[in-house]
Image (cartoon, coloured by chain):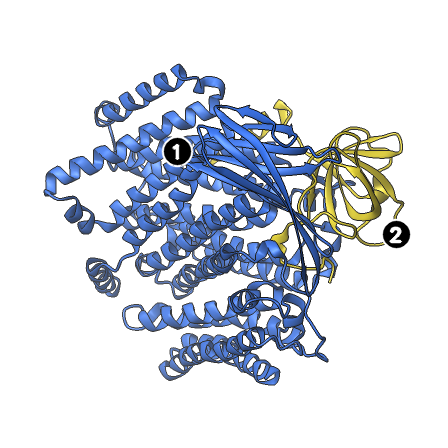
Chain colours: A yellow, B blue
């Protein structure tokens, strides 16, 4: 019975991966280079922030949350989430196009962690 | 004052350590006096922890910024209520709350059961003592809420989105739930150590598990509603690791609550129940670890968190402890009876359990995926929303269906024909509902249609059961009063159906459009007529900075009426935040939900407009769930008598 159940769950997993629902790489600015396709990019927002979320896009740069890293220019199209500002940790989903990262979704670090200033 | 708090925590640590060590000694040597003094130490630890909690609460209310914790989480302009909520706003305070609830629960459970379950209590005391000793050690040595400093002029303040009535109730509710799962775990472990693995531990802790599960469940609904009205992205659950942290132990506890019924009745699933109760406890501790350590949100800052390694060690140690105990007592946990048929009450409960655990473990897999891939592959990867949505459908929809079938199947062996006869009305209702829904166009989403149809099926089974029972007893109240557990369960099932309807309606059938409007312009969205009337700009200054509230006023016509405000708040210190505009149509349980996305230089404004059918059923489900749980929780004299009878049986 239990063996059957385990087999069933494994089968569902296999179907899921076969159907193509899969994971995306989780990267930071320091290891973004050389990853074509959709990835998830986490980093700290570096100014200046220019433009708007719609039309031409919101432009800013991204830096590793900890330690040294190259600055990745970001163009974001979409709704700018609450609490977005310079110095905040954000998570972007998008693709590297040329030298800049074109993001289609952005979330700021979850406020339910209660920390008023991230990193302290 | 801080010294008093610190001293109280040291006392708590020593008392809980004593409860653990002396308790073990007293239980092993069967020395009653030692065991009793260990028990009293555990009770005393609650009072010393309460002293520490009062010190912190007073410091928060008095804005005593010489406490580093107070200045890090509050500011002068914060009202008393929100200053107090900062108690669970940070790591140190929430650990203290954890210890307070743990020692409180522990003391109460031990005192209430000291007569009928004496043979178990001697072991419950050292187990709860050891767990509490871990938390008080962390509070004393690693992460103290009583660190002092030269007081700054003002504190850092509390994030505005947390200054919300929901944040007064939601976190403590979750803590009552998380910590509550320690009690059944401690009793289960005590049953195994003492070798008294009869069903008394289950009978004695049923209400504890139920209460913990109720708090955890209701707390999550409150959190979802907070996200919906306050965070302003148009949803209520994002499969965020911090949200999943509460969902996983709830799922494990749900499975446990069902499978213990089979053990009580049939003496089956005894190993399984031990595994489940340990799993629920581990997931609760892991959930706290997840919320507090930030290990998932930024996987590279793992070492930065001061308590991360301690918690991980604790989770591993208690998991090893549970596994060793279960393996050691395997011969004692052998089932008295076997599953006789794949179509029986026992079997459907087993399917329910397998599905719940499968769902729980797939969520866990998704949560751990970034960490595991970081450890074992060159590149960390993350699971996104489609992964969770897929498994919610695959495991959740059969669960929904089983909820209708399970309570109506006969014990031991059911015939398919008899079952079909019992279910003829529910099946008919499901078919009619399905056909009607296809006719009105709900066929656009297959999972949505299945969820609706299954819901109709389950609701009808509940109604049929209530009608049948009322006919037999003559009164609905009497019926429920006679078997609170069963009928409370039905009410909870009804709540889950409402939840399923709400989730299916608001996700599978929602409308989401963006509209750019100039003042005076009108747009139509699904029967609603929205006119952008005017714009208000209200600057204000707080101690911590300046902020501007930009509010757009929309006139609502068609299905709705009146006006709707939606704002974008720009703060110099905290960045932008949205205040969504919501208008509820209670007849359809539907929300018109508008976000002010952006103001443009030409005076036009970009709005994001959602229509969310049935979303309000989710919040209603929360209250129905609470009501049903309370019915099942209500003290029952017969249950106490059963416990006494079982004690007599155990003594032989």
Task: Give residue B122's quadrant in the image.
Answer: bottom left
Seen as rendered, the residue at the extreme top is B439
Indicate the chain on which mark 1 is placed.
B
Q: Which mark is residue B400?
A: 1
Q: CA distance from mark 2 to mark 1?
A: 50 Å
Query: Percent position (x, y) of residue B68?
Result: 67, 73
How many numbered discs? 2
Local crowd at mark 2 within 10 Å, few (<14), some, or many (≥20)? few
In the rendered image, which quarter contains the C terminus of chain B? bottom left
Task: Give residue B91's quadrant in the image.
Answer: bottom right
Viewer-nearest of discs 2 and 1: 2
Question: Against B274, is B82 above or below?
Answer: below
Q: Which mark is residue A68?
A: 2
Q: Residue at x 47, y 37 (%)?
A: B562
Q: Is residue B498 left or right of residue B468?
A: right
Q: Is residue B254 something that shows in the picture?
A: yes
């Amino acid at each position: 019975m239990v063996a059957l159940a385990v087999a069933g769950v494994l089968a569902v997993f296999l179907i899921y991966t076969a159907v193509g629902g899969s994971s995306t790489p989780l990267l930071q600015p320091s290891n973004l280079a050389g990853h074509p396709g959709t990835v998830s990019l986490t980093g700290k927002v570096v100014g200046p922030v220019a433009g708007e979320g719609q039309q031409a896009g919101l432009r800013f740069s991204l830096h590793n949350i900890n330690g040294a890293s190259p600055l990745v220019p970001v163009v974001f199209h979409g709704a700018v989430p609450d609490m977005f500002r310079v110095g905040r940790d954000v998570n972007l989903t998008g693709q590297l196009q040329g030298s800049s990262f074109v993001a289609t979704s952005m979330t700021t670090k979850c406020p339910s962690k209660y920390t008023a200033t991230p990193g302290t | 004052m801080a010294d008093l708090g610190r001293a109280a925590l040291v006392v708590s640590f020593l008392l809980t350590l004593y409860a653990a060590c002396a308790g073990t000694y007293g239980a092993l040597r069967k020395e009653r006096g030692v065991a009793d003094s260990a028990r009293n130490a555990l009770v005393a630890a609650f009072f010393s922890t309460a002293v520490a909690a009062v010190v912190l609460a007073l410091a928060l209310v008095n804005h005593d910024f010489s406490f580093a914790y107070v200045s890090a989480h509050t500011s002068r302009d914060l009202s008393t209520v929100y200053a107090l909520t900062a108690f669970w706003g940070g790591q140190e305070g929430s650990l203290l709350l954890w210890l307070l609830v743990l020692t409180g629960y522990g003391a109460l459970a031990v005192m209430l059961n000291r007569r009928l379950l004496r043979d178990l209590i001697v072991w419950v005391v050292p187990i709860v003592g050891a767990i509490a000793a871990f938390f008080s050690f962390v509070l004393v040595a690693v992460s103290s809420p009583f660190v002092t400093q030269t007081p700054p002029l003002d504190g850092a303040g509390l994030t505005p989105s947390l200054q919300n009535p929901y944040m007064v109730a939601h976190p403590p509710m979750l803590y009552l739930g998380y910590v509550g799962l320690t009690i059944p775990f401690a009793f289960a472990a005590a049953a195994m150590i003492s070798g008294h693995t009869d069903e008394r531990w289950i009978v004695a802790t049923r209400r504890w598990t139920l209460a913990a599960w109720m708090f955890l469940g209701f707390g999550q609904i409150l959190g979802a509603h907070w996200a919906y009205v306050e965070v302003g992205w148009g949803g209520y659950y994002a499969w965020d690791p911090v949200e999943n942290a509460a969902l996983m132990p709830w799922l494990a506890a749900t499975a446990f609550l069902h499978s213990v019924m089979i053990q009580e009745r049939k003496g089956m699933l005894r190993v399984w129940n031990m595994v489940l109760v340990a799993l629920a406890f581990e997931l609760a501790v892991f959930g706290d670890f997840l919320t507090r350590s930030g290990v998932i949100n930024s996987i590279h800052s793992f070492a930065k968190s001061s308590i991360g390694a301690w918690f991980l060690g604790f989770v591993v140690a208690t998991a090893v402890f549970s596994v060793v105990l279960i393996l050691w007592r395997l011969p004692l946990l052998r089932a008295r009876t076997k599953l006789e048929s794949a179509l029986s009450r026992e079997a459907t409960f087993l399917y329910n359990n397998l599905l719940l655990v499968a769902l729980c473990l797939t969520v866990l897999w998704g949560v751990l995926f970034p960490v595991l891939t970081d450890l074992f592959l060159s590149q960390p990867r993350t699971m996104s929303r489609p992964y969770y949505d897929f498994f919610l459908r695959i495991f959740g929809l059969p669960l929904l269906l089983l909820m209708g079938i399970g309570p109506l199947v006969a014990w031991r062996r059911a015939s398919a024909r008899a079952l079909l006869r019992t279910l003829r009305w529910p099946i008919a209702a499901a078919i009619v509902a399905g056909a009607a829904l296809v006719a009105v166009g709900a066929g656009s989403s297959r999972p949505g249609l299945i969820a609706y149809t299954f819901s109709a099926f389950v609701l009808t089974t509940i109604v049929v059961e209530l009608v049948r029972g009322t006919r037999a007893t003559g009164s609905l109240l009497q019926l429920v009063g006679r078997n609170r557990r069963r009928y409370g369960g039905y009410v909870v099932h009804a709540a889950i159906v409402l939840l399923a309807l709400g989730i299916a309606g608001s996700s599978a059938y929602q409308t989401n459009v963006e509209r750019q409007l100039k003042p005076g312009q009108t747009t139509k969205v699904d029967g609603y007529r929205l006119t952008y009337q005017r714009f208000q700009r209200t600057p204000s200054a707080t101690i911590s900075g300046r902020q501007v509230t930009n509010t757009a006023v929309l006139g609502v016509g068609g299905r709705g009426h009146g006006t709707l405000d939606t704002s974008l708040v720009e703060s110099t210190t905290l960045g932008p935040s949205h205040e969504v505009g919501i208008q509820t149509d209670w007849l359809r349980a539907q929300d018109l939900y508008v976000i002010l996305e952006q103001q443009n230089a030409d005076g036009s404004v970009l709005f994001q407009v959602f229509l969310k059918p049935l979303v309000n059923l989710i919040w209603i489900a929360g209250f129905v769930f609470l009501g049903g749980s309370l019915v099942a929780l209500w003290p029952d004299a017969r249950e106490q008598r059963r416990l006494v009878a079982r004690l007599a049986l155990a003594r032989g």
